[in-house]
């Protein structure tokens, strides 16, 4: 078998997101990862699964602005993220974090120092 006969496709998580439950799990995993680029990629997949044009319209954004906000190297504003999440039927839920001890201070204390 030669490599010319092998057909591959770029992986796109959007093809596997069937409902808001799937989307919420992907977004939670991205949040747990802690990498902003992973979060942007997950949000981009969710937007593609829902349809970029309809999400942009529901979020009150231009389609080009939405693409720009979800680029891998982008750092979208919080209000943009909240609007996009609302447009796809998701939202943030704030929960207490377990405090990690590092040295004599907790992780939360170091973040505010």
Image (spheres, grey):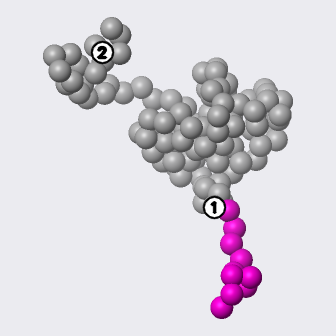
Residue drawn 53% across the image and 33% down it:
36
Helix, strand or loop for disc 2: helix
- Residue 42 appears in which quarter of the rendering? top right
- Quadrant into which the C terminus falls: top left
Q: Which mark is residue 1?
A: none
- The answer to whether residue 88 shows anywhere in this view is no
| Residue at point 77%, 43% (across, down) | 52
Tell me residue 107's x, y (percent).
28, 21
> Distance of mark 2 from mark 1, alpha carbons?
38 Å
Q: Position of residue 76 (x, y in %)?
A: 65, 26
**Rendered-image quadrant of the N terminus:** bottom right
As drawn, 93 above or below 6 = above
Tell which circle, 2 or 1, labels the residue nearer the N-terminal end. 1
Region rendered in magenta? 1-10
Q: Is residue 58 above or below residue 16?
A: above
- Disc number for residue 11: 1
Q: Nearer the viewer, residue 80 or 70?
A: 70
Q: Position of residue 35 (x, y in %)?
A: 48, 36
For the point 23% across and 19% down, the residue is: 106
Which is nearer the eye, 78 or 21? 78
Q: Residue at x 30, y 15 (%)?
A: 110
On the question of residue 98 being in view, the answer is yes
Q: Is residue 49 magenta?
A: no
Magenta segment's dominant SS is: loop
For this rendering, which residue is in front, 58 or 25? 25
Crowding at mark 2 (Cα within 10 Å: few <14, some 14-19, many 20+): few
Residue pointed to by mark 2: 110
Q: Is residue 2 magenta?
A: yes
């Amino acid at each position: 078998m030669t490599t010319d006969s092998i057909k591959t496709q770029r992986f796109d998580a959007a093809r596997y997101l069937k409902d808001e439950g799937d989307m919420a799990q992907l977004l939670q995993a991205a949040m747990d990862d802690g990498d902003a680029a992973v979060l942007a990629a997950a949000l981009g997949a969710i937007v593609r699964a829902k349809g970029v044009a309809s999400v942009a319209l529901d979020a009150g954004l231009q389609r080009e602005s939405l693409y720009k906000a979800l680029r891998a190297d982008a750092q979208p504003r919080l209000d943009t993220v909240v609007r996009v999440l609302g447009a796809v039927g998701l939202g943030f839920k704030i929960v207490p974090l377990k405090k990690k001890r590092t040295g004599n201070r907790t992780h939360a204390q170091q973040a505010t120092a």
